[in-house]
Image: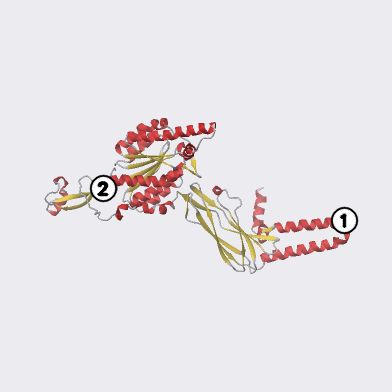
Amino acid sequence: MATVQSIRHSFNNTKIGRFYKDLFLNNRFFYGLFAIALLFIFGYLFTSILLLVKGILLTYVIFLFIDIILLYAGNSQIFSERILPEKFSNNDSNTIILKLNNQYKIDTHITIVDELPTQFQLRDFSIEANLRPLQKKQFSYQVTPFERGEYHFGATHVYVTTKLGLAMRRFSTGNSTMVKTYPSFLQLKKFELISFNSSILQFGIKKIRRIGNSYEFEQIKDYVQGDNIKDINWKATAKRNQLMVNQFQDEKSQQVYSIIDKGRVMKMPFENLSLLDYAINASLVISSVVLRKSDKAGLFSFSKKPENYVAAERRNSQMNLILESLYNVKTNYDESDFGVLYSMVKRKITHRSLLLLYTNFESLDALHRQLNYLRAINRSHLLVVIFFKNTELETMRRQKATSTQAIFDKTIAEKFSYDKRLIVAELNKYGIQTILTAPENLTIDTINKYLEIKAKGML
C-alpha cells in the first residue's frame, strides 16, 4: 500500500501528473456530449444523418483539444495572492483581499474558490469574474467570525476557462495559514471618545493638585513651615544637610480588574454570541478606557480555578497582554466556584481596587449561594456585579396576552423579571454595586458605571 501511494505521489509531481491533476472537463462539455449522444440515437433510427452526427462528434473533440491547448499554451498562468488581516475581530466584519495577476493573452473567465476555515461553515463560497488579457485585478470579501480562537485557511484555487468553455484549468496557491480571532477590538474605536472626561468641555473649572499624606509619592522637597514632620525623609536630610520632606498627591493610578465568570451560566447565546463573548468584549473596551483615564487595568477569569490572570498595570504593552489572554477563553458546563474567586482576590489583589465581576444570576436562590463570598470581597474592595437581562423574556413580558397559553408564558416571564430586580435590591442592601443590562448594552453601561464611580470618588 505504501508503495502504491509513493508511486502515485511521484506521478503527481511530474508534468504529466500535474497536467491531469489540474485539468477538468466543464459542465458545458457534458451538456454538448449528451446532445451528441441523443443525435446518435436518432442517427441509428434515421441512418441518413448518422454520418453528419459523426462529423459533429469529431468537430466537438477537435474543439475540446483546441480549448485545452489555449489553456496550456506558452507560459499562460494566473498568479493569486491572499492578503489576510493580522488578526480577526470577533462579531465584526473583517476584510480579506485576493490579488490576481493574469498572464493569459486571451479573454478568460475565472472562478475563485478560497478554502475558508471550518468555523465559517461556507461550503459553496466562490467568486466569478471575467479577465482581460494580462490584466491585474483585486477582489475582496467579508467574513464575520462568531467565536474566538484559531482560524485556519487552506489554499486559494483559481479555475480558468476560455470562451469555448469545454475544459477548465486549475491554479492553486498558498499553504495553510492561521489567523487568531480576538475579542472585538474594533469596538475600541467605537467607544474611544467615551474615555475622555466630559468636564474638559466645562469652562471656568480649574484642575488643582491636593497634597496628602497617604496617597501616591510625588517628590522630595525642601522642608517649609507647615509641612508635616512625619513626612521628613531622614536619608535625604542627612545627604543635603537640611530638612527634606516627602511630598504626596492623590493617587491617580487606581486598580481596576475585570473578572469574568466562565461557568455554565455564561454559555447562554444571544444574537450569535454567548454571554461570555459579550463579557470579554466589554472587558477589552473597559480596560482601554481605564488606561486612558490613567488607572491600572487588570483581568482574570474563573470557574473551578482562576485562569488568564493579568496583573493590573499601566504600561504600553498592557492592552496586548489583555488581548492575548482573552482571545482563547472558553466557557464550560461547570458551576463556578465563588470560593475560588474570593481566594484569588484575597491572595492576588492586596490594594483596594474596583472589581467588575461579569456573571449571571437567574434566581434569588442562585445569588444566596454566593452572597457571602461577594460580601466578603466587597469589604476590602469596591465590587460591581454585572449580570444580564433575559431580553427574550422581557419582550414576552411586554407583549399583550391573547390566549391562555400566552397568559401562562407572560406570567412566567414576569416572575423571572421580578427575580432579577430582587437580585439587584439584595446586592444593593449589602452595599454591592450592580449593573443589570441587556447584552447589547453591556459595554456602554459598564463604561458609564466606571465613569460614575470615578466622578463620585467612591474608590
Alpha carbon of mark 1 to alpha carbon of mark 2: how far? 101 Å
**Horizontal side of residue 78 vs 30, given as left or right:** left
Return the disc, 1 or 2, that comes first in the chain's sequence.
Answer: 1
What residue lies at 42% left-to-right and 53% top-to-bottom? Answer: 190
Q: Which mark is residue 134?
A: none
Locate residue 177, reporting x and y percent.
53, 54
Identified by mark 2, the residue type is: Glu
User: Which residue is drawn at the image coordinates 36% and 51% (left, top)?
Assistant: 194
Horizontal side of residue 30 vs 338, given as left or right = right
Please give left or right for residue 217 compared with residue 62 in the image: left
| Residue type indicated by callout 1 | Leu
**In the depicted structure, whether residue 215 falls above or below residue 432:** below
Instruction: Tell me the tag on residue 45.
Output: 1
According to the picture, the residue beneath numbered tag 2 turns out to be 251
| Residue 114 percent across, percent down from the top left | 58, 55
At which x and y percent is residue 129? 61, 61
User: How would you rate the neighbour count of disc 1 (Cα within 10 Å): few for under 14, some for 14-19, many for 20 or more?
Assistant: few
Q: Tell whether label 2 touches label 1 (CB within 8 Å).
A: no
Q: Label 2 crowding class (10 Å Cα cut-off): few <14, some 14-19, many 20+?
A: some
Residue 285 in view here: yes
Vertical relation: 59 (above or below) 273 = below
